[in-house]
Amino acid sequence: MSNEAFLQKVKELNKQANVKEWAKYILSNNSNEIDFPLKSISFALGKILDANIYIVNAEGHLLGYHERHRVNTQRVRNLIENKMFPYNYIQRLSNVTETTLNVKIDDNLTIFPVEKRANYPEAMTSVIPIVLSDDRLGTLLVGRVQDEIDDVDALLVEHAASMIGLEIALEYGKNEVEIEKQLSGARLAISTLSVTEVKALKGVFSQINPDNQETILTTSEIADKIGVTRSIVVNALRKLVSASVIEQRSMGMKGTYIKVLNPIFSKTLFSDQDPSN
């Protein structure tokens, strides 16, 4: 095995995956999903290995992929479009605790559709667990229509799995920080409200669509329905705007548009329990 060949492929992977942009993406407030880094590394790895690449997390969600070869049936393409792999397949992957290379197409770990076995008799799948600090974060799947993964490429996919594991962990960590931030903001906002303002906001939030977290309402109608003055509703909403819990703007005769920026607040508002539970 050539160390030089391995290092050359690592350099090529880093270049193709645009690793220098990862830190900028991860630190960006707009990067609210695992997309760019895992999409770029999937493309880079697929190009270098001439393989189809799939990155799935422990729950079976497809986080990134690149299909170098168009071998999938409509059934599998639907799974990819929905970004969710079958439960039974994910269970089989979870039982693979060490890197398993060059699994044949008739094995139940294959990433190739069973309907295509006759078309690609030499197709092989390699299964690389993505592990960080003993936590199984997901699986890297490499599908080649021919040619086995050799020793150099085996090291490359292990290296790629480490890169992917770090990115997943950083993204999860960022999400946890954001949740803690929202939780603190919700608690602080609640602490500024009077009993009647809490009552008024319960009336407001009961009108908000949980799917898109927004609504258009008339503050006077809410006040009449709940049995409080309009000024109480207006003051309560103003406090939430100041706390960055909601976005609010006038829609003229239509009423007031409200968009929830901190979805944890609603849980806090309607619960006597700690919202972190």
Image: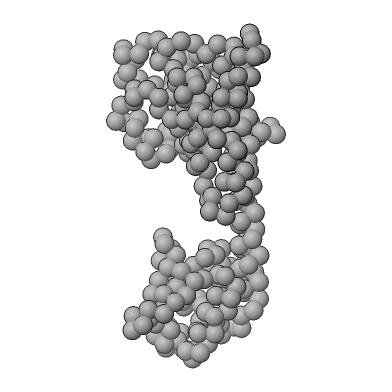
Q: In this rendering, would 252 be left or right of 158?
A: left
Residue 240 location (% of width, % of height): 56, 75
Along the line of sight, the residue nearer the viewer: 119 or 224: 119
Res 238 → quadrant? bottom right
Q: Residue at x 52, y 65 (%)?
A: 261
Residue 188 location (% of width, % of height): 66, 71
On screen, residue 184 above or below 238 = above
On screen, residue 209 above or below 16 = below
The answer to whether any part of residue 267 appears in the image is: no
Quadrant placement of the N terminus: top right
Along the line of sight, the residue nearer the viewer: 59 or 165: 165
Q: Residue at x 49, y 19 (%)?
A: 49
Along the line of sight, the residue nearer the viewer: 72 or 31: 31
Point out the residue furthest to the right here. Answer: 133
Point out the residue furthest to the left here. Answer: 74
Q: In this rendering, would 118 be left or right of 179?
A: left
Residue 141 location (% of width, % of height): 50, 25
Residue 65 location (% of width, % of height): 45, 32
On screen, residue 261 above or below 141 = below
Q: Residue at x 53, y 53 (%)?
A: 30
Check the image and tell me how it is coloured. one colour
Q: Residue at x 41, y 80 (%)?
A: 250
Count of number-bearing discs: 0
Res 86 → quadrant? top left
The answer to whether any part of residue 241 appears in the image is: yes
Quadrant placement of the C terminus: bottom right
Q: In this rendering, would 158 be left or right of 16?
A: right
